[in-house]
Image: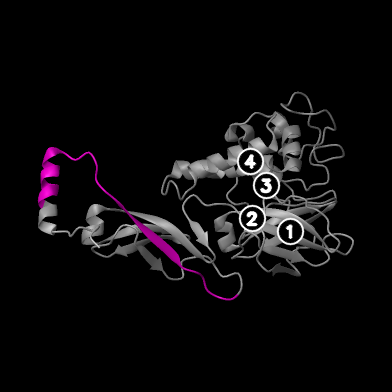
């Protein structure tokens, strides 16, 4: 099992602020997103590595434990009993056993045997409840064997009416207290909003695993009755982060469809990416630039009720450039044959 240098993965120094980490993550995530580089296995692997690094460094508690773990991680892979504390990069002095009193993982289950010493255990989970393809290193220290001990906050939760806006970090941020509720802000990706996901909320000494339902939009509120302490409700205000390719309009999605001049003139079947994967989309002959082709039921799930919105493919005709002399002559002949009327004539 290989040590993961999460700071190197994100290209930030160990002294980086949370804002710098967030900025680096967003830049790299956009650059290597599978939708930006479809079929590129190297980009997909890089995207997963960047996501894993952010899962640790964007969470202040995980980052602290990671910094204390440092290069001595191998001594802890088997449980850590009797392991020395000398040397590790970024390490602080303390107990020999990282899972014992004073250690960075005190109160957590030992990853290998799944046992525990009490205290709270938790994990980040996707909609399917797994570790989202994270590395063995991540699962050893931040995932496997650390399932949530507490009551699942999805029980008794509900989604309030849409409205307002939210801004926040990758993790759930502790929020402000109100007379009747405690608010926290949570950021999810468009794909997570489409499938539903889970987040871990820390409120004082309590950790809750919260289900974010499919179909949420920026401003959606997930309310958990009496989970905010003192009998108050806990309200999560959702922000859906921008996607590099899709634009959202309620339950509908809009995506640009570049086509060649030949495809627009003569018609064709072209590959087109949806949230569910690639499809072959029929482009009718004579398709004009800017035309919208509607794919029924390929948009976002409706937050309330059944079904999904539509996906709108907005055609962008890409003209050939750098024509040779022969191509220019042929283009002139074609235009003469086409006898196109002046489009500016009333």
Q: Residues within 10 Å of mark 1 (few under 14, many from 20)?
A: many
Distance between the Cα atoms at labels 2 and 1? 18 Å
Q: Residue at x 46, y 41 (%)?
A: 42
Q: Is residue 148 visible?
A: no
Q: Earlier in the sequence, mark 4 or mark 3?
A: 4
Which mark is on residue 184?
Answer: none
Q: Which residue is mark 2?
A: 239
Q: Secondary structure at mark 2?
A: strand
Residue numbers of the magenta segment: 305-333
Q: Residue at x 68, y 31 (%)?
A: 16
Foreground residue, 157 or 6? 157
Number of the front mark, 2 or 1: 2
**Residue 138 placed where, x, y %?**
65, 43
Quarter of the C terminus within the rendering: bottom left
Q: Earlier in the sequence, mark 1 or mark 3?
A: 3
Q: Quadrant of residue 99?
A: top right
Q: Which residue is mark 4?
A: 22
Q: Earlier in the sequence, mark 2 or mark 1?
A: 1
Number of the front mark, 4 or 1: 4
Q: Does 250 sit left or right of 179 as displayed? A: left
Q: Which residue is mark 1?
A: 209
Q: Which residue is mark 3?
A: 169
Q: Secondary structure at mark 3?
A: loop
Distance between the Cα atoms at labels 2 and 3? 10 Å
Report the label total. Answer: 4
Q: Earlier in the sequence, mark 4 or mark 2?
A: 4
**Residue 70 placed where, x, y %?**
71, 31
């Amino acid at each position: 099992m290989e040590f993961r240098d999460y700071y190197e993965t994100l290209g930030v120094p160990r002294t980086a602020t949370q804002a710098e980490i967030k900025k680096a993550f967003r830049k790299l995530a956009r650059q290597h997103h599978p939708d930006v580089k479809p079929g590129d296995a190297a980009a997909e692997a890089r995207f997963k590595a960047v996501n894993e690094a952010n899962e640790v460094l964007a969470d202040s508690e995980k980052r602290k434990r990671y910094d204390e773990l440092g290069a001595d991680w191998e001594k802890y892979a088997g449980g850590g009993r009797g392991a020395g504390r000398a040397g590790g990069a970024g390490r602080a002095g303390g107990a020999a056993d990282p899972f014992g009193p004073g250690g960075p993982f005190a109160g957590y289950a030992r990853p290998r045997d799944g046992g525990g010493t009490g205290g709270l255990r938790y994990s980040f989970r996707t909609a399917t409840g797994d570790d989202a393809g994270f590395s063995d290193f991540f699962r050893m220290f931040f995932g496997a064997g650390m399932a949530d001990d507490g009551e699942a906050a999805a029980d008794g939760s509900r989604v309030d009416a849409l409205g307002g806006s939210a801004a926040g970090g990758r993790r759930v941020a502790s929020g402000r207290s109100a007379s009747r509720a405690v608010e926290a802000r949570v950021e999810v990706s468009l794909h997570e909003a489409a499938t539903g996901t889970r987040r871990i909320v820390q409120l004082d000494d309590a950790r809750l695993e919260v289900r974010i339902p499919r179909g949420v939009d920026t401003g959606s509120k997930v309310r958990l009755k009496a989970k905010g302490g003192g009998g108050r409700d806990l309200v999560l205000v959702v922000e859906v982060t921008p996607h590099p390719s899709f634009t959202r309009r309620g339950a509908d999605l809009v995506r640009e469809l570049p086509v060649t001049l030949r495809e627009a003139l003569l018609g064709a079947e072209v590959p087109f990416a949806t949230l569910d994967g690639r499809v072959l989309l029929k482009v009718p002959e004579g398709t004009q630039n800017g035309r919208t082709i509607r794919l029924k039921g390929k948009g976002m799930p409706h937050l309330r009720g059944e079904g999904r919105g539509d996906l709108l493919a907005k055609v962008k005709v890409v003209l050939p450039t750098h024509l040779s002399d022969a191509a220019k002559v042929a283009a002139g002949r074609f235009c003469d044959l086409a006898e196109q009327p002046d489009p500016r004539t009333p």
